[in-house]
Amino acid sequence: MTSLYLKFGAAALSLVAGTAAAQVTGAENYPTRPLRLITGFLPGGVSDTVARVTGDKLGELLGQRVIIDGRPGAGGVLSMELAAQANPDGHTLYLGQPVITISPNFKNKPSFDPLKAFTPISLIGFGSTMMVVHPGTPASNVKELVAYGRSQPPGTLRFGHSGMGSTNHMAGELFSARTGVKLTAIPYKGAAVNIIGVLQGEIHIAMLPTLTAIPHVKSGKLKAIGMTGAKRSKAAPDVPTIGETLKGFDVPVWYGFIVTAKTPMAIVNKLHTETQRAVRTPDVRDKLASQGVETQLATRAEFAQLIRDDAARWKKLVKDAGIVLE
């Protein structure tokens, strides 16, 4: 399976300064008031940090506050629906994540097409997620976990996730489909309660933000099984990817700003330029790196292609693996 991590040459890593004036034509007075940035998860998690760190810098560059509006629920679908209905004047942004590309595969899918409801502004970067198990689980790597799971009655092993269709939910479902180990999915309202669940033994397995998991792994309260993405995390280079054992296993977590469709292109381009400036600042880059998020610059076209490729990838995987998303 091809990784969605983007690879760009030097030209793609720089903004085209010569077209800046043309891009902002028609957006000279924008923004005229504080911006609203809708997110789909609880405060304190990685998504919230990405929104606040990047949003604060974007607001500084635009000369207006960026107010975070967290709307958790349904693995991010509720926030996505709210963002899709926003006035297309560029004053409401959405922190886009894979819920956009996964949700069309739900049995009860959104009433609109997420791929057509939004216009991409700017990719921000990629996060890393670690599969961990409770120390009482007799497995310390993917091979041992698969062997243990196969030795138990189907559904014995429980894994926690942050909502139907979230990336950590899909990671568990994909693991089950690829190994034949039937897992029972247990929903939680965010990573904070998910980690409590695995620490207390309510569940055997959890997919957690890497920086959240590391202290508990080092203390021996959790065991690291593998990274869910295509490559090892810089924050935990000794933890192998699940894909190193299960070939093709890859559940990327991307973050980016998007805006409802029909937003004037002049405003979209201005937001792209300023968000890229924000992502390039050492302050934003370092703060996000401290949360396990690697920033990545991209053109709007490249970001749009990433979203299309991700959607096609999930559609095929859900169909081929027979994953049912209620």
Image (tube, rainbow, N blue to C red):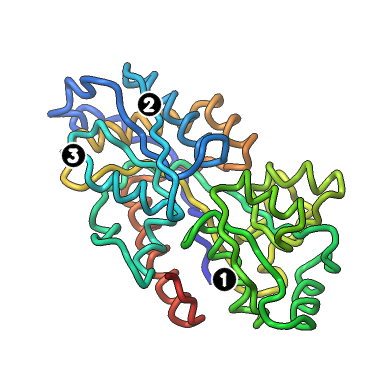
Instruction: List the residue tagged with mark 3.
Output: 88
The disc at residue 67 is 2
The image quadrant where one finds the C terminus is bottom left
Instruction: List the residue tagged with mark 1.
Output: 173
Disc 2 versus disc 3: nearer the observer: 2
Residue at mark 1 to residue at mark 3: CA–CA distance: 36 Å
Tell me how many marks there are.
3
Q: Is residue 236 left or right of residue 4?
A: right
The disc at residue 46 is none
| Residue at image location 67% in from the left, 47% down from the top | 210
Amino acid type, callout 2: Ile
Which quarter of the picture shows residue 151? bottom right
Q: Earlier in the sequence, mark 2 or mark 1?
A: 2
| Residue at image location 34% in from the left, 66% down from the top | 104
Secondary structure category for the residue under label 2: strand
| Residue at image location 38% in from the left, 32% down from the top | 275
Asked if residue 215 is positioned above or below residue 324 in the image, the reply reads: above
Decide: few, some or many residues near mark 2? Use Cα within 10 Å; few <14, some 14-19, many ≥20.
Answer: some
Residue at mark 2 to residue at mark 1: CA–CA distance: 34 Å
The image quadrant where one finds the N terminus is bottom right
Amino acid type, callout 3: Pro
Asked if residue 226 is positioned above or below residue 17 in the image, the reply reads: below
